[in-house]
Amino acid sequence: MVRFKHRYLLCEVVSDDPRCRLTLEDRVLGTLVRDTIARVHGTFGAAACSIGFAVRYLNAYTGIVLLRCRKEFYRLVWSALPFITYLENKGHRYPCFLNTLHVGGTIRTCQKFLIQYNRRQLLILLQNCTDEGEREAIQKSVTKSCLLEEESAGEELSDSGGEETAEPME
């Protein structure tokens, strides 16, 4: 049995219109990327990239998209992404573009990169704050989200700990 290797492209949808992100759907974005590949690279590119291509993750609020494709043809997908200039959904056409943040071999490496990227963006956001009230609001929301993550991790540990402790049989 042969294992097929994949590449994951972590992208960000950049648009001036906030409604563009909220109308994102993985099916629409997948067909848009496939159509763009066919337009840029022809039938060979469309056929090569259609096997194993999928939108693995989509966050409509942050505009983060994770695309999966075969390792041999990830450069075809990557080179077609700058030619996406609009997103069309439900009869509306929104100007946008896809910014490729990272290319990785696993979803885990993309997640690690995304955590570091979000931390850098938060630092930039904190540095660009104009007044102290705005800075405190951002810091409060960040610490609240960190506390929620720690609580959920603690609950997972306590839940799994109860299942593993079993009395030995005599």
Image (tube, rainbow, N blue to C red):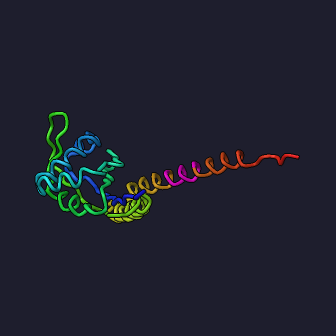
Q: Please report the residue visible at 29 percent of the width from the left and 43 percent of the height from the top.
A: 26
Residue 68 point in image, percent of width and height: 32, 54
Residue at horizontal 14%, vertical 41%? 93
Residue 151 lies in magenta, yes or no? yes
Task: For residue 35, say whether it is visible.
Answer: yes
Seen as rendered, the residue at the extreme right is: 170
Q: How many marks?
A: 0
Task: Please name the residue shown 57% across and 53% down the image.
Answer: 150
Q: Does the magenta stretch include residue 77?
A: no
Q: Is the magenta stretch mostly helix, strand or loop?
A: helix
- Residue 121 placement (x, y as % from top left): 35, 62
**Residue 149 location, x and y as percent?**
53, 52
- Magenta residues, start to end: 145-152
Asked whether residue 122 is in view, the answer is: no
Residue at image position (31%, 51%) is 52
Q: Where residue 31 sits: x, y (%)? A: 21, 44
